[in-house]
């Protein structure tokens, strides 16, 4: 499977990028196998695989563990897309 590119993470559409793709992106960017990430995050490797394949959705607590294992911030799973500025309500 080819590595995901930076352009995937900075996609400019109105839909959020699935966490599964972002998890795989960061894992591959770090050069970790699924088992290596699981070891670093102190979670089961099957769990990591199931999240990456979209079979389960991670909890915030799980994302925190994965972020720590990847040495990234939790917010890196939620990249900011280019959006119009919010309008002020009166």
Image (cartoon, helix red, strand yellow):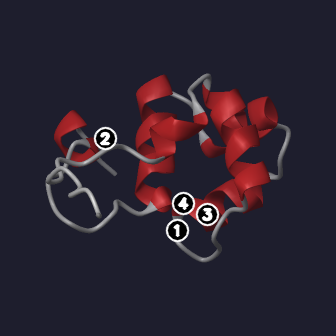
Q: Position of residue 36 (x, y in %)?
A: 69, 33
- Camera-side residue of 33 and 74: 74
Whole-angstrom CA distance, mark 3 to mark 1, is 5 Å
Q: Position of residue 33 (x, y in %)?
A: 59, 38
Q: Quadrant of the C terminus?
A: bottom left
Name the residue at 78% across, 51% down. 61
Whole-angstrom CA distance, mark 4 to mark 3, is 4 Å
Q: Is the C-beta separation of discs 4 and 1 under 8 Å?
A: yes
Element under disc 4: helix
Mark 2 or mark 4: whose residue is earlier in sequence? 2
Q: Which is more foreground, mark 2 or mark 4?
A: 4
- Camera-side residue of 34 and 69: 69
Name the residue at 82% across, 52% down. 44
Which residue is identified by label 1? Answer: 53
Element under disc 3: helix
Element under disc 2: loop
Which residue is identified by label 2? Answer: 3
Name the residue at 41% across, 63% down. 18
Q: Which is more foreground, mark 3 or mark 2?
A: 3
Badge 3 crowding class, 10 Å Cα cut-off, few under 14, some 14 to 19, many 20 or more, is some
Element under disc 1: loop
Residue 60 in which image quadrant: bottom right
Q: Position of residue 23 (x, y in %)?
A: 51, 48
3 to the left or right of 85: right
Say whether residue 65 is visible.
Answer: yes
Which residue is identified by label 4? Answer: 52
Residue 66 in which image quadrant: top right
Vertical relation: 84 (above or below) 5: below
């Amino acid at each position: 499977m080819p590595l995901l590119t930076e352009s995937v993470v900075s996609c400019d559409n109105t839909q959020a990028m699935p966490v599964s793709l972002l998890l795989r992106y960061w894992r591959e960017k770090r050069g970790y196998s699924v088992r290596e990430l699981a070891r670093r995050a102190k979670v089961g490797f099957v769990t990591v695989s199931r999240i990456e394949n979209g079979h389960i959705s991670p909890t915030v607590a799980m994302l925190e563990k994965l972020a720590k294992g990847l040495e990234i911030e939790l917010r890196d799973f939620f990249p900011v897309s280019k959006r119009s500025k919010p309008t002020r309500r009166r």
